[in-house]
Amino acid sequence: METPKEHIESLFSNTKEYFENKTDLWKLKAIDKSTDIVASIVEKLLLFVILTVFFVLLTIGLALLIGYWLGHSFWGFFVLAAVYGIVGWIIHATREKFIKTPISNSFIQKFLN
């Protein structure tokens, strides 16, 4: 039969072990969340680079094609520059709704899951 002193020592030992395990669990959860976020950022960055190269090459090809149709290659670049200027203005006007809010929600969701 355990004495009260041994029982209290056992209780303190179990409490200490519980808090050590709880601390280790918090560390592992933090590492899991941070690696998930970093992996998501790297994935999106890589996709951005690939899509950027694709659209640059597509733009050059379209500009040359439009220029061919209009008689001078530089006109195709002017036409596409105007189109991209209009698209950029529209994106700038709606950036809060279509860019900032979804990105913020994505990061918040990553942190809370």
Image: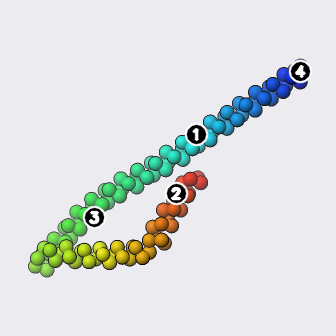
The residue under label 4 is: 3
Q: Residues within 10 Å of mark 2 (few under 14, many from 20)?
A: few
The residue under label 1 is: 28
Q: Left or right: 82 with respect to 22?
A: left
**Sequence-wise first label, 3 or 2:** 3
Secondary structure of the residue carrying tag 1 is helix
Looking at the rendered structure, the kind of residue marked 3 is Phe
| CA–CA distance in space, label 3 to label 2 | 27 Å
The residue under label 3 is: 55
**Sequence-wise first label, 1 or 2:** 1
Percent position of residue 85, x then y: 30, 75
Percent position of residue 6, x then y: 84, 22
Residue, far bottom? 70
Residue 63, quarter of the rendered image: bottom left
**Sequence-wise first label, 4 or 1:** 4
Q: Residues within 10 Å of mark 3 (few under 14, many from 20)?
A: few
Looking at the rendered structure, the kind of residue marked 2 is Phe
Secondary structure of the residue carrying tag 2 is helix
| CA–CA distance in space, label 4 to label 1 | 37 Å
Q: Left or right: 88 with respect to 23?
A: left
